[in-house]
Image (tube, rainbow, N blue to C red):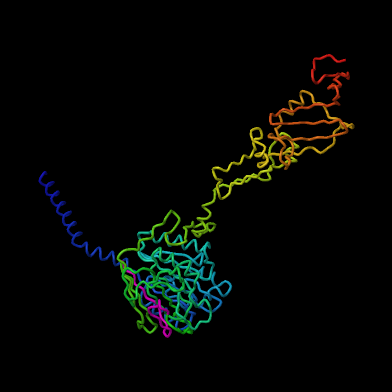
Amino acid sequence: MRQIKDIHAKLSLSMVSLLLLAIVTNSGTFLQTALATSDTRIVAAGDWHCTEDAAKAVNVANSLKPQLILGLGDYSSTETESCWVNLSKPVDSITKIAFGNHDNEHDGLANAYLNHYGLSKQFYSFDIRNVHVLTMATEEEFGAGSEQYNFVVNDLRNSANDPNIKWIIVTMHNPVYTSPNGCSDSSCESDEELSELYHPLFDNYGVDIVLQAHVRNYQRSFPLEFNQESPLNPIVTSTSKGEYKNPNGAIFAIVGTGGGELKHELEGTSTFMAYQQDTKFGILDMHFSDNILEGKFITTDGSTMDQFSLTKTAKKKVIERISDDTFSGTNIRAVSDSGATNAIPMAEQEAQDAKPSITFKLDDATVENTNAKLAQDAKPSITFKLDEVASSSNSKVNPLAEQESQQAQEVQEVKPAVTTKQDDSPPADADSKPMLLSEEQVKQEQAKPAVTTKQDDSPPSDDKPISVSEETSGKDKSATLSDNSGKSNVKELETVDSSNNIMSEEDSEGKIVSTNLRDPFAPLN
């Protein structure tokens, strides 16, 4: 029995060894098969216009057996989608579209295309194997801060940081750059707004090729970087006619040769264009492997007119951000997917950041006070606002104007934060005599702020600020004085005999009392 078990163990070990040997021996074939599955064929063209030449272009595209067909806009000149849908049936399941001006020309046509291709918006993105495709909508709002702009910023940022994505394609209808041509519409010229807003993004996030149409010819540029000094004259980073190794900048191609009349004759060649032609219909055939993108312009008669290759040994390193939301070398900020969030130019945001995060302003709000008359009649005479520039250390402003400790000049220059108005109503007493205050009333007077009257703009006559309210009638005078001690002194003054320095006054019981001012204790004759 033991011998049988030993035999089984040896047989099992032998089988495992043979299996491991087979895996190692065939590992090369296995890896080659895996790499082969990553190869992707994509064809593209625009301005089809549902013509006989468009049908030929569809047949050529289908014969290449691509995994994806990219429409670059303008599928029909009719009011319904039926012509294009019927013509493109052989490739319908592998077709994705960008929207052109003719697709938005008739009511309901754009929505019909959206429904047919299962789209919710004219701008969107998707992945096919190791290729990311971003489709923009030049017929919709694409300015800074728009929903589309925010979407593009985030989409490119995400795809550039995705380790599974090796290639990035951008499709749209209107061209960013073009050579002079016979189209009289301004939309057939290079677009400065598209260049300034989006080419820096393409540079930062390693876009490989930008596909466009609208101009009915074929043009293919050198690899181009954005030119900040002259946006309509991009910087050529390689002058090779067809082979590019780890180039800086994207290739921009116009493929407006899907079948619509070739009526936009080329009138010159821009310095940034590597190849162009305006006589043949055809498609751009692109083959993406792990490290090489091979492109060919194939005409509807099967000939090849342009050919180029782009070798990329490593995915372009994304330029690191200065912070979580700022990108080096641009005025672009990251934004959220929310439509309410806008991308903000960096210079403008920095100006906002320099201001205090909170600004206080004590203005018209009523100051809480137990004295209703004070709250009603008097607003603060000094308003404090913490604004963009902090006060210097030697600049001292006291909002309460410390009346008890400041000198007369300080009081004059800095008025109290709360100033009351003297009541202008006449005394209740018909004889306008000063009213004697009781001890209780004196205490109430003392409890009030030291400054209880409206400050006069004229300078005080002595070192202490004194507020005075005075009435004079004949020889009788009454005065209420309030000095910095906070005490209130009330006194009724009578006539004084200057010859003998005798003063007579009436006491509280109505009796006449005489006093010798020189010697108050001396007897009176």
Relative to the observer, which residue lies in front, 250 or 471? 471
- The C terminus sits in image quarter: top right
Image coordinates of residue 229 in percent, x first then y, are: 45, 69
| Residue at image location 25% in from the left, 63% down from the top | 31
Image coordinates of residue 333 in percent, x first then y, are: 47, 58
Horizontal side of residue 373 vs 48, given as left or right: right
Image coordinates of residue 83 in percent, x first then y, are: 50, 78
Q: Is residue 34 above or below residue 367?
A: below
Rendered image quadrant of residue 39: bottom left
Relative to the observer, which residue lies in front, 344 or 306? 344
Q: Is residue 230 above or below residue 390?
A: below
Q: Which residues are magenta?
A: 270-290
**In the image as oriented, which residue stretches furthest toward the right?**
430
Q: Residue 413: within the magenta?
A: no
Horizontal side of residue 408 vs 70, given as left or right: right
Q: Is residue 357 above or below residue 499?
A: below
Q: Is residue 22 above or below residue 408?
A: below
Horizontal side of residue 16 vs 281, given as left or right: left
| Residue at image location 39% in from the left, 70% down from the top | 250
Horizontal side of residue 119 vs 382, given as left or right: left
